Image: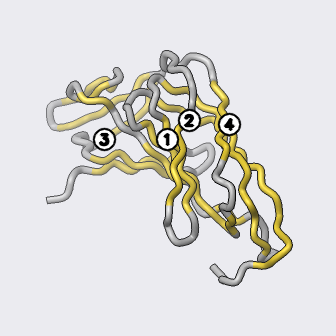
Amino acid sequence: MSSPLAVVTNIHNFAVGEYSNFKFNSFTYFEGVYLGADDDGIKILQGETDSASPILASMESGALKFDKSGSLRRLLEAYISFRAAAKGIIIGLINHENVENRYKATHDPVAAGAGVQRTRIKLDRGLKYEESKFSINNGAGGALDVISISISYETLTRKSRNDW
C-alpha cells in the first residue's frame, strides 16, 4: 500500500508541492494557521516535529536552461536567501544526467519566521552545464523557507556536444 500524499499549489506562482506520509484528507491555510482534517476532525498543524521526529523538507527546481545558443556555462557560485531553524541545509546542483553535486550551506540557525539569511555557495571548478536543476533540503529537520536562488556563471566559447 502506498503512503498517503497531499498535493498543494501556490496560487501566486503556480508552484506545486507535495506532502508525503500525510494522514489528513484535507489541508488548508486559514487565518494564519495550517489545518489538517481527517476522520477524527480538524487539527491545527504546528511545531517543529511530527510525532517527535524532525520534519524533513526538500525542494527541486525545474530545468534551468541558461540560453538557447547551445554554449556551455561554467557555474561559479550560487547565492541562496532563506530562513532556517536548524543547521544542515544542503544545496544540490543536478546536471542533465541527474548526477548531483552537494554543498552544505553555512548559516546560523534562527527561530522560524526570524530574519532572512543569505549565503554564498562556491561551486566546484570544472562544472560545465547547458542546463541544470537545484535541490535544497533541511537534512536536520526544522523550518525552512527558501526566498531566492541566484547563480553566477561564465559563458564558454565552445558549444555543447550533446543536444539535451
Q: CA distance from mark 2 to mark 1?
A: 6 Å
- From the viewer's side, name the closer residue of 50 and 138: 138
Q: Marks 2 and 1: CB-CB under 8 Å?
A: yes
- Residue 115, how many percent across, how many down? 61, 18
Residue under pointer 1: 90
Which mark is first along the chain, 3 or 1?
3
The amino acid type of the residue labelled 1 equals Ile
- Looking at the image, is 131 positioned above or below residue 101? below
**In the rendering, which numbered label is found on residue 26?**
3
Which residue lies at the image location 30% right of the left edge and 33% below the top edge?
36
The amino acid type of the residue labelled 4 equals Arg
- Please give left or right for residue 18 compared with residue 84 in the image: left
Which residue lies at the image location 69% right of the left edge and 65% below the top edge?
128
Residue under pointer 2: 105
Which mark is first along the chain, 4 or 1?
1
Which mark is first along the chain, 3 or 2?
3
Residue under pointer 4: 120
Kindly report which numbered mark, 3 or 4, lies closer to the viewer in this rendering. 4
- Please give left or right for residue 31 compared with residue 120 in the image: left
